[in-house]
């Protein structure tokens, strides 16, 4: 994997762009799923967030007393996550590594990849390598929860999420466009160059605009199944269409969230 530059070089802006997410509620659900789907029914005590970016989920896990590790390839994201955790008085281990080749020498009760970060895996070989590495870091009763975009977002004319939104945090507001109608998937590679525009307005500061082009690899549900089978190291336990008891096929589903365990 190569380092993606632009919006990912500004972790504060990236975190702001994603602030429409309810991280606390999502962590509630992740912990509930851990108890539900672990054969022991035991709560998770150790967690690893892959492609963590600002590590908002890892920080929330740490805030709740779990031993948390955040892994990301990008040095700016790692530095930001480390600084935010320190400022909040949280114990968080931040590791700069590739999600296809990391080797931490530890196993975890729970591993998570949020926000469709597997879209940075551009080939099937990379996806399988990622699954293999993840499996090697799961404890005997550990779970891997993988959040991806819902397939309808790229395969239909009725996407479940908008490519444009507005966020407000205190006196700061921003408009975000992640993808334009002209950003088309290559029919052979299933990769699109998504154009990202973020306009940030702060009091007593010039309006700031971030423009970027982010390569995005779309993975279908059947390709995910194929990657899991090719790896052979994991098996699917459950699949959801949202952070809750929403089936992937429900009209209200807006994500493709897969719960896996070691095969």
Image (cartoon, rainbow, N blue to C red):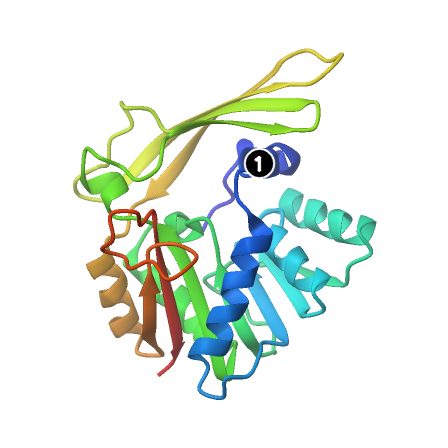
Q: Residue at x 51, y 70 (%)?
A: 32
Residue at 71 percent across and 47 percent down: it is 79
| In this picture, residue 187 sits left or right of residue 104 | left
Q: How many marks?
A: 1
x and y percent of residue 5 in the render? 53, 35
> In this view of the protein, can residue 52 be seen by the observer?
no
Position of residue 263 relative to residue 123, above or below, is below
Which quadrant holds residue 199? top right
Residue carrying label 1: 14
List x then y, in percent, for residue 45: 63, 76
**Horizontally, is 70 left or right of 231 in the view?**
right
Which corner quadrant of the image does residue 67 belong to? bottom right
Q: Nearer the viewer, residue 211 or 188?
A: 211
Q: Judge by depth and name the residue closer to the eye, 70 or 215.
A: 70
Residue 211, horizontal then vertical, whole percent? 50, 22
**In-front residue for pair 240/132:** 240
Disc 1 is placed on an element classified as helix
Q: Residue at x 38, y 54 (%)?
A: 242
- Mark yes or no: residue 148 visible: yes
Q: Nearer the viewer, residue 223 or 174?
A: 174
Image quarter where the C terminus lies is bottom left
User: Residue sitting at 20 percent across and 60 percent down?
Assistant: 222
Residue 120 lies left or right of residue 181; in this view the side is: right
In this rendering, is residue 84 above or below 110? above
């Amino acid at each position: 994997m190569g380092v993606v530059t632009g919006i990912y070089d500004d972790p504060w802006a990236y975190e702001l762009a994603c602030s429409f997410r309810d991280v606390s509620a999502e962590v509630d659900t992740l912990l509930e799923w851990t108890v539900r789907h672990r054969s022991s029914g035991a709560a998770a005590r150790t967690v690893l967030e892959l492609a963590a970016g600002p590590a908002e989920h890892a920080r929330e896990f740490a805030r709740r007393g779990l031993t948390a590790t955040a892994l990301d390839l990008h040095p700016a994201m790692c530095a930001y996550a480390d600084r935010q955790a320190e400022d909040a008085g949280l114990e968080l281990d931040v590791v700069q590594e590739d999600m296809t080749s990391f080797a931490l020498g530890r196993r975890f009760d729970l591993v998570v990849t949020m926000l469709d970060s597997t879209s940075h895996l551009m080939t099937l070989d990379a996806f399988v390598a990622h699954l293999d590495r993840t499996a090697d870091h799961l404890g005997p009763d550990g779970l891997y929860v993988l959040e991806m975009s819902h397939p309808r977002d790229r395969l239909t004319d009725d996407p479940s999420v908008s490519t444009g939104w507005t966020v407000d945090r205190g006196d700061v507001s921003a408009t975000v466009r992640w993808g334009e109608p002209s950003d088309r998937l290559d029919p052979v590679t299933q990769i699109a160059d998504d154009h990202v525009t973020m306009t940030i307005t702060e009091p007593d500061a010039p309006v700031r605009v971030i423009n970027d082009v982010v390569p995005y690899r779309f993975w279908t549900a059947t390709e995910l199944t194929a990657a899991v089978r090719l790896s052979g190291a994991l098996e699917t336990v459950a699949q959801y269409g949202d952070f809750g008891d929403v089936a992937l096929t429900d009209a209200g589903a807006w994500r493709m969230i897969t719960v896996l365990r070691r095969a």
